[in-house]
Image (cartoon, rainbow, N blue to C red):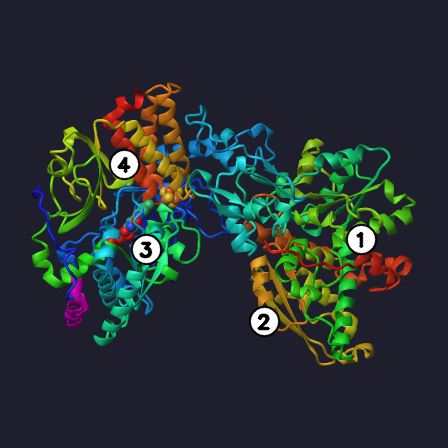
Amino acid sequence: METKKLSRVDYIFKPETNCIDTLKKVMTMEKEEFILELIDSGLKGRGGAGFLTGLKWKLAAEAAGDVKYVICNADEGEPGTFKDREILDRVPYKVLCGMALCGYIVGAREGFIYLRAEYRFLVPKLRKAIADLNVEFLKIGLTFSIDIRFGSGAYVCGEETALIESMEGKRGEPRNKPPYPVTEGYLGKPTVVNNVETFVNCVIIAGIGHQEYKKFGTDNSRGFKLFSVSGDCSKEGVYELELGMSLQDFVDEFGDGDTKAVQVGGASGFCVPRKKFPDTIIGFEGIPTGGSMKIFNSSRSMYNVLHNYLEFFEEESCGQCSPCRVGCQQLLKGIVAVKRREKSSPYLDELMKLAETMKVASKCGLGQSVGNAFVSIIENFREEIVY
Amino acid sequence: MSKMINLTINNMPVSVEEGTTILEAAKKLSISIPTLCYHEDLCVAGNCRVCVVELVGMRTLQASCAVPARDNMQILTNSMKVRQARRHIIELLLSEHNADCTKCYKNGNCELQELSNEYRIGNRLFADLVTEKNYTIDQSSPSIMKDDSKCIRCQRCVRTCSELQAVSALAVSGKGNHMKISSFYDHPMHEVVCTNCGQCINRCPTGALIERNYIDEVWEAIYNPNKHVVVQTAPAVRVALGEELGYDPGERVTGKMVAALRRLGFDSVLDTDFTADLTIMEEGTELLTRLKKALVDGDTSVSLPMFTSCSPGWIKFIEHMFPELLPNLSTCKSPQQMFGTLAKTYYAQRKNIDPKDMVSISIMPCTAKKFESVRPEMRDSGFQDVDYVLTTRELAIMIKQAGINFMQLEDDKYDRFMGDSSGAAVIFGATGGVMEAALRTAYELVTGREVPFANLNITPVRGMEGVKEASIKIENVKADWSFLEGAELKVAIAHGLTNAKKLMTAIRDGKASYHFVEVMACPGGCLGGGGQPIPTSPEIRKKRTEAIYAEDEGLPIRKSHENPEVAAIYADFLSEPLGHKSHELLHTHYKARKRY
Ligand SMILES: Cc1cc2nc3c(=O)[nH]c(=O)nc-3n(C[C@H](O)[C@H](O)[C@H](O)COP(=O)(O)O)c2cc1C
Ligand code: SF4
């Protein structure tokens, strides 16, 4: 398997001088040609699910209809992620140009930023950038307008179909898929939903070309990515790293020297214990992450960590589907009962099976990923849960 | 024809039209997949997940009610993976469900209970989540009881209330472990926009939403030697009651029902159909009077179109949602309430009974009638006109309690006084029926001829289309009605309140104009009422509809004005339609209500 050494890169936050030129360049290309470029770059979505971005745009471009939408998912609700805020704060033009680029390619004239309510302080900056770009778009003959919509604090509204429901003024509950948003999204029209960072990557690929982009990362995980590093670390913050490094390299760089475990991918991700650091690749061939990297040192109780995540899910489940709504409550109650000796430790095995059911039977990614943290923590730290 | 899709389910090949869900495809192979949130009348939710199946090659299971079949799919509906998940889901639902089955009103007619039984869920694997939530039962409504401890959050009621009824009295509130089905800010049900139609009850898979039942009160009355207990039965009951008692949908059990009622011990078994016929006389006359005032006298205060007022769910809906159109509502009380007042006046006098010693019971396909009976407007006899309203389901329970072998009963006949009816009254139970009955009478009144439809069947007003329109040309009228010569009477019919809303919006905005409009709150009309046997489905409504029209065709009298008892009551008691006494006893007015 291809791996990379940990290396810092600087593409995403590089000053945004020539986005408009990049847009102009793409506008001279055939749309299909750019879609191929994007597919060849291997870029996968940066919001967590990792769908091939080029393919998503292709599907939206091919979807029938003259009204289509582009949505930038800036809900950033995953515990331990704070990289989208940084992007919107430092390079808003790149995000907006990425959305415009998408609009041009798929045939959408309207875009929305679905902004986490806590990020309202970014609005003046974003509005100014939008106003500036309106002028620029006009100059190069691009018809694309962007508006801002606010989330209201529910984690599940980061899930793309719940996000769309919420934008339509309804309760933020995930929809059945299919149909996917690329065919039936906002107001029933074909819609591309991408993460903030994904849009920036698209602009970068348009600028440097897929050949150059592909030099970064591995077969399965092309390019570079922002990591939100937090927990027991030597230097917390947002870092741009090439994809494909081992978790060991990562911990050596960011840990505090006493790292016991890393939660890769936030509450919905996986917990990796120390002994597996060397063999764990950060990326789609190993453990993918939307950016959240939470480091725990040996002073931490993994029971508390798990308890905390389960409390989060118990509250943040939208509550519509039974495996997730009730399952979260049972997992939480279950570990408490085991800890209190009200249930014996084999009950944890029953709960592990339940977690598997939740993974395969829940309606959306939220319920499907509760089992990730649960199973990985119980498997690796069972004694901390029981005793 | 659309494209055909070929797939296999449990290794058996099947070919279905594009767009067919896996669930429907499985039905074609006679494979049943359990469901809870799925209901034929509602949009697909895919939230209970008990219908998940394995799609070979996919990690996640698929909700078969929501996922369309695609070519070359290999589906397994009973693999170990599916069984494990399904079992877990049932156990999870049971853990948040107050599974006090033996004491539950829905014991024996509960989809969760059935599933739990099918999967032989014995020991309780998971922790009980009910106790800590401190649920209370909302008994504030005279029609509906809401018990959240029995709720499995399938949202059928929510979808019913918003999609079918455009009321949205019930909605989802909270998320995660706090997610539940709420009325507006959890106000008690009797304070909110709820129309009491009971369509939610009819679709609740468990005992979370049930009717307020008055079975014990009725037994008390029957066994009270000092009370004279009369019972009336609505037209739609006779074509549905059988479903609760061993018959297939569509069986007409009028005679057996009458026999059973007699055995239960009612002093007099009477027919709401009698006052349905009376309603036609009153409402028809009211319509003609309004038309005359508007067309001849140029009276601009007259509101047209006139709306029917038989359906109490519809009445409460218009009070909340379209109060500006209240003047258009016919002032006629519903047949149930006309019957109620007449029972304690006309009937009491004739039988020489003190009305205070009477108890008046009605058997209705409807839960809104329970609310209607306790409205302050409904005491014109000097007493509460109708004392207790039972649904078709409650009557079935009483029959079972009494140990009556319903299927073996000999047919019996209604009592002679206030027990006669016409076919026109019977069809009140189907959408379009009041309209058809009114047209049969009004047309003949005005022209002296029968309506120009084969065998009196006015087919354009029949059927399950949400909003129906029809018009009938009036020619060669009798002298009294010369102002109607050549007029085209335009009518519309809506059933289900979502359709009513559409129609009302069009009328209010001046986008549609009619003379007479029939609205029934429930899909299909009363035969699909909220008090009817569970389940009710499009197929079952169809069967009941056929039964209603068959009942009509089988009766010797098929026009309200030809019911001899109707003639008699005008001769002996009321003197004339819309007369002084009618106004006093049979008509009323409604008022605007708040909108939450
Ligand atoms: C519970 C849940 C929360 C999510 N939250 C976010 C989020 O905050 N931001 C985001 O970009 N994607 C989030 N996603 C993923 C989105 O559904 C979607 O896959 C993503 O926005 C697609 O963009 P991408 O392909 O560029 O990653 C979430 C998914 C789930 C299931
Ligand atoms: S998995 Fe959870 S968040 Fe997703 S639809 Fe089901 S209840 Fe809602």
A58 is within the stretch colored magenta: no
* Residue at x 69% of width, y 37% of height: B406
On the picture, is A115 further left or further right than B137? left
- Mark 3 close to ligand 1, CB under 8 Å: no
* Residue at x 39% of width, y 32% of height: B88
Residues marked 1 and 4 touching at CB (< 8 Å): no
Range of magenta residues: A19-37
The residue indicated by pointer 3 is A121
The amino acid at mark 3 is Phe
- Tell me, for residue B420, which label it has, or none: 1
Q: Chain of mark 3?
A: A
The amino acid at mark 2 is Asp
Q: Please determine if labels 3 and 4 lie on a single subunit.
A: yes
Q: Chain of mark 1?
A: B
Most extreme residue toward the right, as rendered?
A: B352
Query: What is the chief secondary structure element of the magenta stretch?
Result: helix
Disc 3 packing (10 Å; few <14; some 14–19; many ≥20): few
Q: Please determine if labels 1 and 4 lie on a single subunit.
A: no
Foreground label between 2 and 1: 2
- Tell me, for residue B509, which label it has, or none: 2
On the picture, is B424 further left or further right than A61? right
The alpha-carbon separation of the residues under discs 4 and 2 comes to 55 Å
**Viewer-closest of B3 and B554:** B3
